[in-house]
Amino acid sequence: MVAATPSREPLFQSDWVRDGTHVVSMGSDAPGKHEVPTKLYSKAILFCDLASQSVQIGDFQHVRHEIEAGTLHVTPIGDVIEGRAPGRRSEEQITVFDSSGISLQDLYMADALIKAKSGRGAIG
């Protein structure tokens, strides 16, 4: 599921999300924007493009205190790409990716997808 809106309140309820769902929040890119219900975060694995930006202007700004206190953990997607952190560990896990907009990562992923599609393999 991908949310890419200027919403200032969650677009759905956390109990609507089934096991194995991957949620992407792309529209929360300024203070006050909010697409994903915060109750979902405690039962999901959280990823972002840049943690400091995500807790300032991304959807994770609404759980900033929990992240800073260590109650919730957010993994930068770059750590997964580089093999420093695991991604999804099972098909049943709910994952949430908060994309607050890091253009270099967008370009890297676009290049990898184009190369994979053309059969040349991903960059590395």
Image: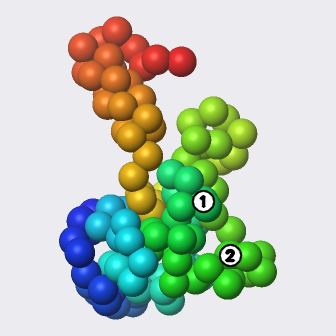
Left or right relative to 118: residue 10: right
Q: Residue at x 46, y 17 (%)?
A: 123
Looking at the rendered structure, which numbered label has been put on residue 67? 2
Locate residue 98: give its quadrant.
bottom left
The residue where tag 1 is placed is: 51
Say how many tags the image has: 2
Q: Residues within 10 Å of mark 1 (few under 14, many from 20)?
A: many
Q: Residue at x 56, y 53 (%)?
A: 50
- Coloring scheme used: rainbow
Q: Residue furthest front?
A: 31
Locate residue 2: give its quadrant.
bottom left
Residue in front for this viewpoint, 37 or 100: 100
Mark 1 secondary-structure assignment: helix
Query: Who comes first in sequence, dot 2 or dot 1?
Result: 1
Distance Cα–Cα, label 2 vs label 1: 10 Å
Image: 81 above or below 56: above
Residue 81 position, x and y percent, is 57, 36
Q: Residue furthest right?
A: 69
**For the residue marked with disc 2, what is the amino acid?**
Ile
Mark 2 secondary-structure assignment: helix
**For the residue marked with disc 1, what is the amino acid?**
Ala
Locate residue 97: give its quadrant.
bottom left
